[in-house]
């Protein structure tokens, strides 16, 4: 066997990450060579790179670990990686027109998206605490820069600074929790931690799990570590907000499921209480705090907090059905979020972006297609059948009831009713308030993302079987 043949099996599972890394380096060189004239080429190159990596991911098979067990490529990782790549590619499509109009079109932006995506892919495949932390930090460092990308805007700079300071704090908490887990188990490997926790659970392990949960809760923007979300969502450029609400959310949820199901399955009683509390608090805050919001980006921030709470219901169940519900929820949440932000990025008059609820007045008469799509997203987020959002909540609620967490499911239903108020308020403004001047044409990138997202949300009930089956296979690989 030649040296190359002996290395190939080890690098095949990490081939998507390697391809993205090499591609990012090539894009940096091209951007440095061409300067500001390279913006268009780097955007196209990054988009092609993400699409090619997507096909690499979906073409993989089996359940393989490599790098001494630190990295795993299984059906769960593949599904979540595919969602992450879709979210990142959609963000680049949504960003192009916006950045050109705002005159901040720089080649560094798509490269930062690619670097952020590499970290997110590692998070989805991490099989020990060190690889998990490396992926998390790679994703976070690029995200801090993206948040402050509009450097001449005070709000954007403030958003980047807040995200950086609070993100550093959360990373420290996660690292401290990981060090406690390592200290009391003697290993950083998830399978090794499972073996070490066969006996009685010590207080040190419980404390370590608490700090790890705090660190991942920040990345999820779950209560009580949500404080950065509304300000960062509002201050960041709108395409960046769309990015933060899509791909990183999927990666953070993949990381959370991987940690608790992969490393602590035998101490479910310890972390289940934490997840239940975080889920209830997130659902409640996301439902009630958004009622008084007039800025759509802040409203979407609270909506994302609430949706994280609903997704965590599936994790709290601690079962295969629960993880299946989480995967289905994240697929549908990704479509709803990208669709909503595609509409938001299409709302402009004379080069001026509009971001308040009142700006949607009479949208159904000035732009019926946009109004219909945004109404579909809002009804879906509210969980109204037969739209996809209803099925997303149905699967996590059913898993919770099956696991005996009836109270948690009831709280989820009640907060869904409360949250429906502010979703339906947007629909009322669009269809019943006085119309304003017509909006400009929809940018091509936004039209593509909006069309695909709307199709998923509206037509999901016709062919749910492929997604449910893929989510079932992903969940089964963790048990």
Image (cartoon, rainbow, N blue to C red):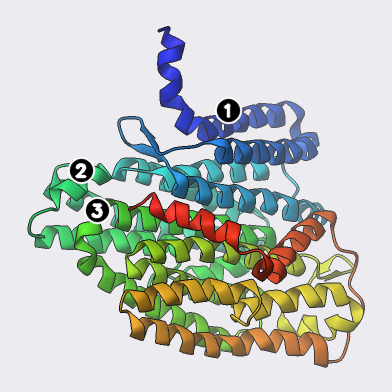
Residue under circle 3?
Answer: 176
Q: Secondary structure at mark 3?
A: helix
Q: Secondary structure at mark 2?
A: helix
Residue 324, horizontal then vertical, whole percent: 45, 62
- Counting every numbered tag in the picture gives 3
Depth-wise, is mark 1 or mark 2 nearer the camera?
Answer: 2
Left or right for 310, reference 238: left
Measure the alpha-carbon separation of dots 3 and 2. Answer: 19 Å
Give residue 39's quadrant in the image.
top right
Residue under circle 1?
Answer: 22
Residue in the picture at 52% in, 54% down? 470
Left or right for 260, reference 350: left
Residue 386, horizontal then vertical, whole percent: 65, 78
Residue under circle 2?
Answer: 192
The answer to whether one can see residue 386 in this image is yes
> With respect to residue 331, does 64 lie above or below?
above
Decide which of tag 1 and tag 2 comes sooner along the chain: 1
Quick check: marks 1 and 2 in contact, CB under 8 Å?
Answer: no
Residue in the picture at 61% in, 84% down? 293
Residue in the picture at 39% in, 49% down? 477
> With respect to residue 390, does 125 lie above or below?
above
Image quadrant occupied by the N terminus: top left
Q: Secondary structure at mark 1?
A: helix
The answer to whether one can see residue 292 in this image is no
Alpha-carbon neighbours of circle 3 within 10 Å: few (<14), some, or many (≥20)?
some
Decide which of tag 3 and tag 2 comes sooner along the chain: 3
Residue 179, horizontal then vertical, whole percent: 21, 49
Give residue 42's quadrant in the image.
top right
> With respect to residue 440, does 174 lie above or below?
above
Alpha-carbon neighbours of circle 1 within 10 Å: few (<14), some, or many (≥20)?
few
Residue 247, horizontal then vertical, whole percent: 56, 55
């Amino acid at each position: 066997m030649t040296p190359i043949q002996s290395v190939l099996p080890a690098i095949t599972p990490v081939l998507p990450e390697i391809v993205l890394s090499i591609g990012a380096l090539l894009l940096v060189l091209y951007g440095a060579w061409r300067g500001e004239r390279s913006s268009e080429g780097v955007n196209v190159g990054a988009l092609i790179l993400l699409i090619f990596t997507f096909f690499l991911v979906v073409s993989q098979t089996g359940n393989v670990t490599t790098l001494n067990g630190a990295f795993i490529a299984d059906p769960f990782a593949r599904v979540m990686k595919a969602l992450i790549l879709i979210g990142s590619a959609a963000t680049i499509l949504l960003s192009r027109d916006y950045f050109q109009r705002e005159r901040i079109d720089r080649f560094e932006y798509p490269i930062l998206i690619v670097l952020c995506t590499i970290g997110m892919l590692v998070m989805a495949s991490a099989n020990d605490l060190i690889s998990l932390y490396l992926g998390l930090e790679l994703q976070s460092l690029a995200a801090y820069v993206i948040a402050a990308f509009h450097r001449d805007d005070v709000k954007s700079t403030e958003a980047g600074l807040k995200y950086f300071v609070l993100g550093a704090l959360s990373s420290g908490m996660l690292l401290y929790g990981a060090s406690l887990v390592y200290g009391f188990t003697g290993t950083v490997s998830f399978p090794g931690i499972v073996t070490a926790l066969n006996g009685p659970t010590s207080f040190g392990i419980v404390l370590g799990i608490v700090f790890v949960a705090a660190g991942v809760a920040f990345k999820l923007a779950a209560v009580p570590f949500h404080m950065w979300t509304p300000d960062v969502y509002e201050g960041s450029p709108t395409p960046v907000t769309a990015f933060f609400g899509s791909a990183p959310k999927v990666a953070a949820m993949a990381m959370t499921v991987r940690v608790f199901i992969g490393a602590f399955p035998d101490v479910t009683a310890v972390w289940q209480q934490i997840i239940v509390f975080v889920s209830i608090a997130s659902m409640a805050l996301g439902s009630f705090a958004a009622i008084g919001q007039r800025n759509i980006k802040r409203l979407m921030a609270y909506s994302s907090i609430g949706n994280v709470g609903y997704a965590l219901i599936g994790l709290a169940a601690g079962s295969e059905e629960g993880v299946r519900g989480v995967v289905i929820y994240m697929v549908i949440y990704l479509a709803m979020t990208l669709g909503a932000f595609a509409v938001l990025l299409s709302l402009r008059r004379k080069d001026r972006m509009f971001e308040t609820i009142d700006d949607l007045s009479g949208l159904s008469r000035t732009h019926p297609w946009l109004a219909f799509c945004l109404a579909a997203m809002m009804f879906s987020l509210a969980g109204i059948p037969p739209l996809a959002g209803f099925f997303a909540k149905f699967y996590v609620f059913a898993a919770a009831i099956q696991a005996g967490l009836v109270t948690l499911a009831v709280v989820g239903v009640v907060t869904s009713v409360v949250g429906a108020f502010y979703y339906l308020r947007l629909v009322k403004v669009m269809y019943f308030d006085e119309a304003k001047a017509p909006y400009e044409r929809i940018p091509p990138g936004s039209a593509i993302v909006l069309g695909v997202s709307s199709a998923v949300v509206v037509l999901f009930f016709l062919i749910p079987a492929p997604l449910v089956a893929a989510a079932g296979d992903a969940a089964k690989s963790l048990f």
